[in-house]
Amino acid sequence: MITFLIRRLVASIFVVLGVVTLVFLILRAVPGDPVESILGEQSLEVDKEALRECLNLDKPLGEQYLLFWSDVASGTLGELCDERGVTVMDRLVANIPATFELALAAMFFALIFSLPLGIAASLRPYSWVDNSSAVIALLGISIPNFWLGPMLLIAFSLTLQILPNPGSEVAGLTALLLPAITLGTGLSAKLMRMTRSGMLEVLNLDYVRTARAKGLPRRTVVLKHALRNALLPVVTIVGLQFGALLTGAIIVEKVFARPGVGMLLLDAIEARNYLIVQGCVLFISFTYVVVNLVTDLVYGLVDPRIRYD
């Protein structure tokens, strides 16, 4: 286990390093002057030079790269030029809780919706329950969240007026419900079909038939014996898709005007704020790596037969 952890940690470091380096180079390869994009073409030359110096754009590319990683090592990720004394890490810390709240709510919605339907579909394969769940899953996978979000807003906020709209500044569970459904719909569709296929495979194994032959209640056989062993691929999808929820939250946060890392990243891209874009990408890539590592470790809890060597 220790050897596995060390190997994965080393690989994760190279993954994060590669992603951030690629973003660093792409940002500086985009045509146009970011200083003019931020200040405008009519700004004074002295102001342009001051901003260029603050962003380290007056230095060679290699020195800019080393300065960026020095900011990473210091934990600040760089100081913002338009807000003296405020660092990129300060902005991230202020926005990360809202994004995690949305991602966790979407994950909760996906699990409570997909697992019961997936189990019910596996217990009655090719019945109307199974066929209905297949149609629901197909719709969930096919509908993009940038379309689903506005449709839900039109239906529940504007037409029925039972849930707050983004401009009402209402917080709490009611304001989180529509964004969570929008973000979690695609994931719930995947988990539903994965649960069904995993359960169908496990229900036909010898130990499940033995448990039935012993006279154990059907609920015990399904939930204790079959479901636990069918959860391994589901755990894989849940772990990998949690990182995708964080990136998917970028669009959902924009649609529902929610604060978070997504809104912070989009605003930074629009303003060509290199420091914030690099900080957001570093956070997202680091989250992906950590979630994947935790997912691998959870395998051993779900299935004790798994051992790393």
Image: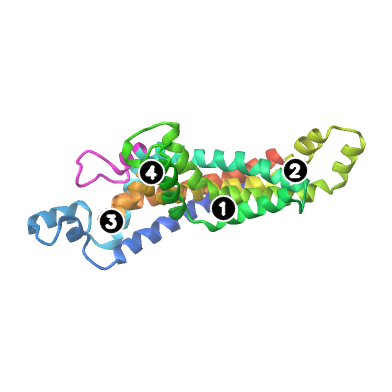
Disc 3 versus disc 2: distance between alpha carbons?
47 Å
| In the displayed structure image, the side of residue 25 where residue 188 appears, left or right | right
User: Which callout, 3 or 4, points to the residue nearer the camera?
Assistant: 4
Judged left or right of residue 120, residue 61 is left
Q: Which residues are magenta?
A: 76-94
Residue 270's mark? 3
Q: Quadrant of the N terminus?
A: top right
Query: Residue 195 location, x and y as percent?
Result: 69, 47
Q: Position of residue 54 (x, y in %)?
A: 19, 51
Return the residue nearer the eye: 234 or 157.
157
Q: Is residue 307 visible?
A: no
Q: Residues within 10 Å of mark 4 (few under 14, many from 20)?
A: some
Q: Secondary structure at mark 4?
A: helix
Q: Relative to 141, is 39 on the left or the right?
A: left
| Secondary structure at numbered mark 1 | helix
Number of numbered discs overlaid on the protein picture: 4
Which residue corresponds to mark 2?
229
Residue 140's disc number: 1
Callouts 3 and 2 close, C-beta under 8 Å: no
Mark 1 neighbour class, 10 Å CA radius: few under 14, some 14 to 19, many 20 or more:
many
The answer to the question of whether label 4 and label 1 lie on touching residues, with beta carbons closer than 8 A, is: no
Nearest to N terminus: mark 4 or mark 2: 4
Taking the spot 55% from the left edge, 38% from the top edge, the residue there is: 108
Q: Nearer the viewer, residue 56 or 234?
A: 234
- Label at residue 158: 4
Element at badge 3?
A: helix
